[in-house]
Amino acid sequence: MRVSKNQLFKRQITLTEIGEEGQQKLQNSSVLVVGCGGLGSPIAVYLASSGIGKIHLVDFDTVDVSNLHRQVFYSLKDIDKPKAAVLSEFIKDRAPFTEVSFTNKPITKDNVFKLISNYDIVVDGTDSLPTKYLLNDACVLKNKPLVYGSLYKFDGYVATFNVLQNDGTYSSNLRDAFPKMATDIPNCEEAGTLNSIVGIIATQQVNEVLKLITGIGKPLINELLIYNSLQNSQLKMKLKASFSNKKIEELFHTLTYFDAACSTQNPDWLITSDELKELLSLQKQSKSLEIIAVLPNLDLPFKVDKIIPIQKFEANKLSIDFNKTYVMVCQRGLTSYKATQLLKGKYPELKVASLIGGVSSY
């Protein structure tokens, strides 16, 4: 079925603040969406549905069954397929005036400038703290506005960073709110999240993008919105642009922005489900295997010896037996790989492995 822009965007064009001029601004704009999960997938779909002319998606991950409760633009038939590719096809089917493309690999220090250079606005839909700081620092250095979103349990955070202001200066950025990257904040796999807060924050980010492009309303510039879904309460934290570009440039040259969850896993530190099943069958005759779950409340298909949440996982405090093989398990094999790295860092000769795909793939 062929449709016209006036038909498709009739309700939006009817708004006097938007009109045909505002709709054309959306059509002429380009947006980079980094992350195609709980935040990024609805962000991309809503932006395309609003008439953004060009969208590029970046995500290295595949669809997992544990995603579906909050990543509602994927279905059961999409499990194990690349998120960016699936989402791209979904958008193509419903947004004929949006040119959508994707990159099916992580955004890193090596490719970040190339990826952000061709887009007007960058949107952070990631679940990775190192990646959030990478996007922030790169956008500051290349003078790109960044629409930020983040989640923690029932709380959501939204801001629009690094916007050119009337006096020629740029507005505040992530480091003006949080100068240093925290090392003990769990992601949604570790801390859990309610699907409603994910949708709320995603559409708040979409709202920021639309305001920036059309020039209507008041974007969240020089302030951070913090919303709590349990109390329906919110506050705005005022920010001041004080973290200098020079300091960010120095940090960019020294930091790796490395996130194990976004990197290629060392195959020597991995164990497949079949390999673990074989070890478990041998375990009846031997006590040489120890399984540690690094997330609480897992629906486990086998018995584990210990449950140590990753936030409390300290390799130097574990009682280690070098005659044993240790297997780390979590839901999807990301947090368990982090624990494996910690153990290998402390005990390089220890036999330890992370279950590939976690218990959801067992």
Image (cartoon, rainbow, N blue to C red):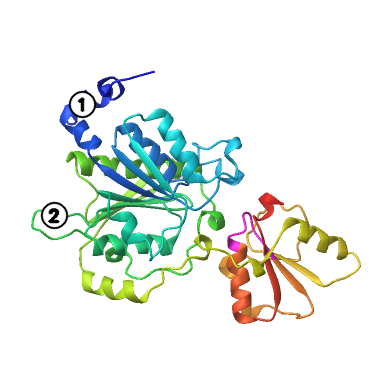
Q: Is residue 244 visible?
A: no
Asked which secondary structure carries label 2, the reply is loop
Residue 6, percent across and down? 25, 21
Q: Which mark is residue 15?
A: 1
Report the amino acid beneath label 2.
Gln
Most prominent secondary structure in the magenta stretch?
loop
Quadrant placement of the N terminus = top left
Q: What's under tag 1, amino acid-wise?
A: Leu
In this picture, residue 47 sits left or right of residue 35: left
The answer to which quarter of the image holds residue 11 is top left
Q: Position of residue 358 (x, y in %)?
A: 66, 56
Which residue is at the front of the view, 181 or 118?
A: 118
Vertical relation: 144 (above or below) 308? above
Is residue 129 visible to the viewer in this orientation of the structure?
Answer: yes
| 3D distance between C-alphas at marks 1 and 2 | 26 Å
Choose between 56 and 296: the one closer to the eye: 56
Q: Earlier in the sequence, mark 1 or mark 2?
A: 1
Q: Residues within 10 Å of mark 2 (few under 14, many from 20)?
A: few
User: Is residue 5 shown above or below 278?
Assistant: above
**Residue ID at (58%, 67%):** 338
The kind of secondary structure element at disc 1 is loop
Lateral position of residue 298 relative to residue 151, left or right: right
Residue closest to the eye, 235 or 21: 21
Percent position (x, y) of residue 303? 78, 59
Residues at discs 1 and 2 in contact (Cβ within 8 Å): no
Residue extent of the magenta highlight? 328-335
Residue 354 point in image, percent of width and height? 66, 64
Q: Is residue 79 left or right of residue 256?
A: right
Residue 177 appears left or right of 271: left
